[in-house]
Image (cartoon, grey):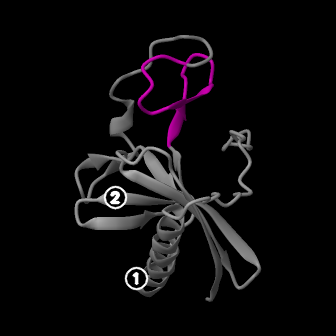
Amino acid sequence: MNITEVRVKLTEAKKNRLQAFCSITIDNDFVVRDLKIIEGYKGAFVAMPSRKLADKCPKCNSKNHLRSRFCNDCGAKLDDKRALGESRDESKGKFKLYADTAHPINSKCRDEIEQKVLAAYKEETEKAKQPGYKPPVMDVPDIDYDEDNTNS
């Protein structure tokens, strides 16, 4: 795998943990968007793209995020304990509310992605300090895609 391009878009609010969004291009052929650079307790790290986990309303069969208390479509009250089922991460004793949509399979790949992304992030933050800085244009559409295109 060869990461041939990294694009970084710094966020506006400096007090937030979310520092930037980025995309990587692999072998000039494949793009992974919506990686996030987050300021953690031990420094910045790269979070992989993810989506909210959802389930269906028992009344109208509409999708709702696991934290929703009421159905977005019919307004029915949803069971507060429904997140206890499949979404529980047994290894950490926490509830999984998000699932990665793309992620490295091994630590070597994760390390390579993190090194290149954080180097590009550092470079972009240095550029941002210069007078006349113009942020890069990210070709990420501002569209909320329906994640469940199947009728299952």
Depicted 1 relative to depicted 135: above or below: below
The residue shown at (47%, 16%) is 70
> Mark 2 belongs to which amino acid?
Glu
Cα distance in 3D space between marks 1 and 2: 20 Å
Which segment is the magenta one?
53-71
Q: Which numbered disc flags the more N-terminal residue, 1 or 2?
A: 2
> Mark 1 belongs to which amino acid?
Ser
Check residue 68 for magenta coloring: yes
**Circle 1 is placed at which residue position?**
107
Measured as percent of width and height from the top left, residue 99 is found at: 48, 53
Tell me the crowding category of disc 2: few under 14, some 14 to 19, or many 20 or more residues within 10 angstroms, Cα based: some
Measured as percent of width and height from the top left, residue 40 is found at: 29, 59
Looking at the picture, tell me which residue is in the foreground, 144 or 66.
Answer: 144
Q: Mark 1 and mark 2 in contact? Answer it, CB < 8 Å.
A: no
Q: Secondary structure at mark 2?
A: strand
Depicted 127 relative to depicted 93: above or below: below
Residue 39's disc is: 2
Check residue 99 for magenta coloring: no
